[in-house]
């Protein structure tokens, strides 16, 4: 029995559907292949439970996230670069690998470029601050010829149209990581903002006491102590009073 001929229009439709099905199969297979390749998976870690978190990256660099920070990274290299995205504050200890530069991207589009060093990055909506503990890093925008190179012991700030470097005179820049606060002949008026940052408190000075607080100085070290314990020791040393309501603390005479 002779089958009737299939009209050319129907054959054309069959061919189109078959081609579309083949493309769909290829796309699905490709997506599955990309998803299952561990080197291309994107990972995320957030320190959003009020605790510091640490992780080792695929290149054996280590990152310590301050409370509230978040990091995203990919297993493997992207165009021969090691790239992470950071929100919040973190301490990096980067494995030396000159052939694969390490880049930290921030929400405000600034870029920190590293070869092998340790440093902190503090990001905000409009600015980025980098403090270098060892080695050197470059801070600026991507492909920016005006980027600055920061050496060990320097702090750089990018944001609001400014980019500058200065010596880091704050020994407590990683106190959130070490648990150690050190003050060397520092006025109370300068100590309190550091305590506020460390303990995430709103510490205010009564205006009638501000002049006295600017003249009172302390040389003291605290290790893994509560905010109340620290304020009590300073109270005994300097003779002020303080009252706490919720997370707000007022220092007065």
Image: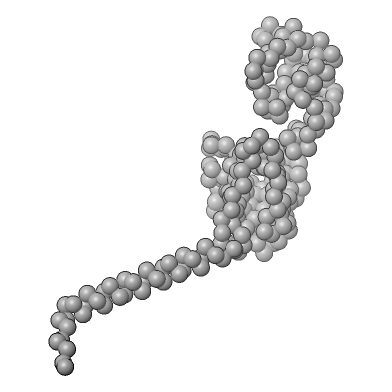
Q: How many marks?
A: 0
Q: Residue furthest bottom?
A: 1
Say if 90 sits above or below 11 in the image. above
Q: Quadrant of residue 131?
A: top right
141 sits to left or right of 115: left
| Image location (x, y in percent) of residue 201 | 66, 23
Say if 30 sits above or below 87 in the image. below
Looking at the picture, tell me which residue is in the foreground, 101 or 12: 12
Say if 67 sits above or below 196 in the image. below
Looking at the picture, tell me which residue is in the foreground, 134 or 32: 32
User: Residue at the location (70% across, 46% down)?
Assistant: 54
Quadrant location of the N terminus?
Answer: bottom left
Q: Residue furthest front?
A: 1
200 sits to left or right of 28: right
181 sits to left or right of 245: right
User: Residue at the location (70% across, 53% down)?
Assistant: 56
| Image location (x, y in percent) of residue 214 | 74, 15
Q: Quadrant of residue 228?
A: top right
| Image location (x, y in percent) of residue 88 | 61, 39
| Image location (x, y in percent) of residue 140 | 59, 46
Q: Quadrant of residue 9?
A: bottom left
Say if 66 sits above or below 100 in the image. above
Asked whether the viewer can see residue 156, the reply is: no
Quadrant location of the C terminus?
Answer: top right
User: Residue at the location (37% across, 69% down)?
Assistant: 24
Colour scheme? one colour
Asked whether the viewer can see residue 1, the reply is: yes
User: Residue at the location (77% across, 25% down)?
Assistant: 226
């Amino acid at each position: 029995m002779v089958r009737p001929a299939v009209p050319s229009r129907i054959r054309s439709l069959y061919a189109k559907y078959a081609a579309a099905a083949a493309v769909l199969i290829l796309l699905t297979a490709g997506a599955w292949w990309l998803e299952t390749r561990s080197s291309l998976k994107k990972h995320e870690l957030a320190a959003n439970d009020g605790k510091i978190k640490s992780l080792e990256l695929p290149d054996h660099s280590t990152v310590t996230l301050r409370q509230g920070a978040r990091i995203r990274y990919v297993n493997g290299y992207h165009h021969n670069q090691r790239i992470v995205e950071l929100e919040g504050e973190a301490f990096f200890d980067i494995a030396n690998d000159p052939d694969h530069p390490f880049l930290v991207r921030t929400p405000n589009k600034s870029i920190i470029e590293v070869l092998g060093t340790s440093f902190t990055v503090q990001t905000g909506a409009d600015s980025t601050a980098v403090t270098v503990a060892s080695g050197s890093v470059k801070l600026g925008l991507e492909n920016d010829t005006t980027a600055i190179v920061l050496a060990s012991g320097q702090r750089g700030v990018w944001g609001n149209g400014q980019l500058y470097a200065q010596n880091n005179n704050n020994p407590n820049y990683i106190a959130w990581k070490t648990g150690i606060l050190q003050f060397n002949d520092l006025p109370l008026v300068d100590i309190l903002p550091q305590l506020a940052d460390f303990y995430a408190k709103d510490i205010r000075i009564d205006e009638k006491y501000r002049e006295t607080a600017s003249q009172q100085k302390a040389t003291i070290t605290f290790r893994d102590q509560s905010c109340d314990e620290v304020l009590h020791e300073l109270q005994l040393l300097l003779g002020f009073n303080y009252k706490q309501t919720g997370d707000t603390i007022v220092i007065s005479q």
